[in-house]
Amino acid sequence: MRERLEELKQEALSKIVEAKDTKQLQEIRVSYLGKKGPITEVLRGMGKLPKEERPVIGQLANEVREVISKELDAKQEQLDQEALEAKLAEESIDVTLPGYQQPSGGPHLLTKLIEDIEDLFIGMGFEVAEGPEVEQDYYNFEALNLPKGHPARDMQDSFYITEELLMRTHTSPVQARTMEKHKGKGPVKIICPGKVYRRDTDDATHSHQFTQIEGLYVDENVRMSDLKGVLNSFAKQIFGQNREIRLRPSFFPFTEPSVEMDISCKMCHGEGCSVCKHSGWIEILGAGMVHPNVLRMAGFDSEIYSGFAFGMGPERIAMLKYGIEDIRHFYTNDVRFLKQFHHA
Amino acid sequence: MLLSLNWLKQYVDLDDISPDDLAEKITKGGIEVDGVETFGEGLKNIVVGYVKSCEQHSNADKLNVCQVDVGDEELQIICGAPNVATGQKVVVAKPGARLPGGMKIKKTKLRGEVSNGMICSLQELGIDQKFIQKEFEDGIFVFPEDTEVGSNAVDLLNLNDTILDLDITPNRADSFSMMGMAYEVAAILDKDLHLPEVEVNRIDEKAEDYVKVRVEDADLNPYYGAYIVKNIKIGPSPLWMQNRLIAAGIRPINNVVDITNYVLMEYGQPLHAFDFNRFGSNEVVVRRARNGETMTTLDGEERNLQKDHLLITNGKEGMALAGVMGGVDSEVKDDTSTILVEAAYFNPLTVRKAAKDHGLRSESSIRFERGVDPNRVKEAGLRACQLMQKYAGGEVLEGIAEFDEQAVEQSIVEFDAKTINRRLGTAISVEEMKNILHRLRFSFEEADAHFTVYAPSRRGDIQIVEDMLEEIARIYGYDQLPYTLPEGTSNAGGLTTKQKLKRSIHRYMQSAGLNEAMTYSLTKEENTAKFMDQYIRALQPKAVKLAMPMSEAHSHLRLSILPELLSSVQYNLARRQQNVALYELGSIYVNKEENISKQPDEQLRLSAAITGIWVNQQWQKEVKTVDFYVLKGVVEGLLDLLDIQHASFESLKMEQMHPGRTAAILVQDEHVGFIGQIHPAVQKDMDLTDTYVFDLDVDRLLEVAMENEGSYEPIPRYPSVSQDLAFVVDEEIPAKRIMDVISDAGKPYLKDIQVFDIYQGEHMDAGKKSIAFSVRFQDPEATLKDEQVEEARKQIVNTVEDSFHAVLRG
């Protein structure tokens, strides 16, 4: 009987090794371990054995059962694993094919630039102020120390609608309006972005419509050195930490003193090249200390309050920053242009 | 203004500074230098030669063989200029000379004759044609007889000069002259200043006996002075003067005209020389022109005048348009012998108006417009007399005939050193401030750090403390100002809710797949009537028109963003960009008045236009062309973003739009915009492919959005149950109507309805459609029982069947 059990074990094990699938394994299980299987049969014939041998054979039979069962399980696991691998191999795809296209849109470069500048000044405690694009002559000119007949009105030939109404030529009227609302009490810290209009013929460097962003800070004891410090942080954040600024005296009727701010040329780092017309500097914006007439007209006591203002053209900044050669690109909305500025 | 450094050197020592450094210092001082141009760079071996003989070339009709004495030798030069002649002193480029443009002169042979150099025209030396005197325009230049043979022609012709191109801001009228720039440069460089002295010998006759001056309108002409110079001999002005005029960008004409122009540049004071014998009377009468009066100016144009123009007359006829241009009748000619020199102060606005009306902006008018130094008018006139005496043989009469009602106010500015430093953020010492004022040549008094400054009359721009702040700061140097940050009240700053929502709309539209566009607010008139939203149309707006548009394409303010946005779509299509999705967030300008008197209402709108392919996944056979529902999804997503409930879409007919594919968009039953396809005929007209658009009233949407507080609804703890229901109904019944009925009938447990299928065609009667809904029920308080769901379902089916003669599909 011992031999018979050993024989059965070997037989079963070799069948397990040869088994190809779960079905065959199941058959092996049933045929060897089932109630009608040969091992059960062996156990049934144990009655003929001498008493003392019975437990020994019984134990052996159980061991054989266990070994076969274990091998069956192992083989099953192996087959499962193989089946999974085959399935995975079959499921593999070409990862180099293009992915599912998401609709892609993005901001206009000018909006993006304006928001960047707004955020920069919001961080310094400024608020964003807006105003009408069709302005009264008073707010566009007179409140800004540009009375009728002032020669500086020549500098900005305007689109008039009536004698008293015009397309605003700058966003400065928003400053005048905001100051007026503050009724002579500071601080006023605003940044004013928006569309403006001038009587120009459109070409590569002129546009009858363009954008502007201006800032105004009125409080007690605002110094010119504060203007310099604020413009310096602005320039470094927008153009890069390694850029220098330079202030030059200039003239605007609504500021005194007036300045123009240049930044060092990115191309030549101040050495002089064609981009900066060999000066090493590129003009970026106009600024100055708010003219006392402007403060007074808006109801502020110019003895107590002082302030600074600055204004710049996002188109110009974008053109310099990205080397855009034609201002009309901003308004023709060629998608090949628009899509270049989607990156954050 | 063009600033000749050779000229400037007469007043200020520039030996120890290079032109580039000087340009930078002037720029930093506040007068921007736009360009630095050195005239005769690299010119050498160019001398004065004397033409000893000049004979026709035996082998060439148009060439002459000249023997030219150049001082140290005699050269045979072949010359083709028509005006070359024996006895002339000419410009000779010797062998080895370099001319502008790099041309090198070599010994050569022309038709068998040796030529040892070249006799030059001024053009060949690099002088612009427009500055060359008439007589030398078509040939070589001829020096005056007394010119020394062999001397350096480059120096004599001022070709060693450097010119700075200045961009002068309107406030700095003082810098619009050589003397003004001399003051400026002397202050910037901290140097001495040497100005010309004006001394004139007078003959024993009086100007007042020759001419009287009468001014009718002293406001327009507070000062008019007339000098008389007799026995003038018209001829060329001296070479140095011609050179300087050319350097300043003025063409030399004759000695008298050149002298007035020279003083104009030197003093910044425009003068006019009348031929007194042709003046037609002994009286200068300055008056306003009469409407309709005419006068012929020096350029031969007959000018139509009006009462805003100031006229210099002889009592009857106009002799000059004040400050702008002289008249042809009293023009200085070759036979002129007696000159009336006008030195006047004309009101800047009058001159500006006249110059503008007649398109005659000149070196003179620009200076009058900005205001000349009232204290130097007479002196400038006298300076011209001095030069006429010296260079035109004139005899200057005693005195001046004048009208003088000019009150020159002394501008006095007082300030404390402390104030200056507090405003600038600096610590400039009192001594330093005094030094700066000395450099500026401003008279002042100082006691205990309190300054009283008497601004010079040339600096009309110095009126208030802030002006002095600027003067001190710019001479001190803006470079030297410290960098500080404001120390005042600190506040948080930030965006308003509305501004934040506007940014959210931008972000949403972009992530929904549209590109932000910016179009022009000014459009052509016909566009103002197109694609106008019905809400705007109901306001009966009158498009705002510019008084003087630059072009018809941009003459009116838009009443819809769409016309220009669609032009942008078309622009892309024309460039083979077939898939275009654009939006713009911007204003329209609503004016209701027939004759506009107040600002139009600027309303914020969001418009979008899409065409072409929306989803393009070709290798997966998934290509979705833009349609109504793509864009409607964008709008629904936007309304959801703004947390706007109760929005609906209702079929709408409007011009320019597809009659079957256009809807009004309603929020809380109010019209807020429209969506749809452009009418195929309009698409064809505009060269568009199938294009879908929407246009929304953002002001209204934001109003609704801001009413919503944003409330919290707890996550339901009990499961929901879904049921599918398909009905067969008449095809024209809109889905929305059925959904409204279901919503109502499904109360109180109905949570949500979705359309999941629409079917028409086979197995369906003509004129019918099947529409399938998935409805979801939920009780927030408990798990729904089957009977409750069944009850609700029955209620819905019955109601829908009754309301629409619908049949539930099995």
Image (spheres, coloured by chain):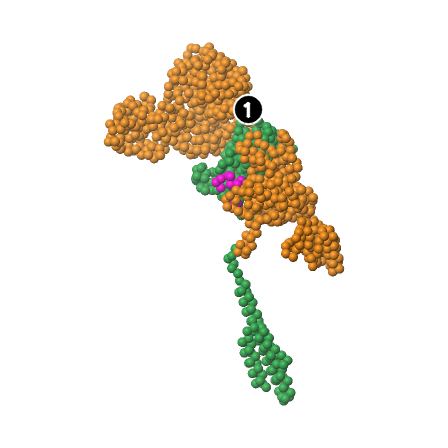
Compared with B316, B593 (above or below) is below
Chain in orange, by letter, is B
Q: Which range of residues does the magenta coloring cover?
A: A324-337
Residue pointed to by mark 1: B412
Q: Is A153 positioned to the left or the right of B64 in the image?
A: right
Q: Nearer the viewer, residue B309 or B481?
A: B309
Q: Amino acid at mark 1?
A: Ile
Name the spot of residue B706 as percent of width and height, x first. 67, 43
Image quadrant in which the N terminus of chain B is located: top left
**In the image shown, does A215 or B724 lie closer to the viewer?**
B724
Above or below, B43 against B517 in this view is: above
Q: Residues within 10 Å of mark 1 (few under 14, many from 20)?
A: some
| Colour green belongs to chain | A
Please say whether residue A109 is visible from this viewpoint: no
**Is B270 placed left or right of A71 in the picture?**
left
Indicate the quadrant containing the C terminus of chain B: top left, top right, bottom left or bottom right.
bottom right
Residue A141: image location, x then y, percent: 58, 30
Q: Helix or strand or loop: what does disc 1 sit on?
A: strand
Residue B134 on image: x %, y %:
37, 24
**Residue A229 to residue B286: above or below:** below
Residue beneath the point at 48% across and 14% down: B314
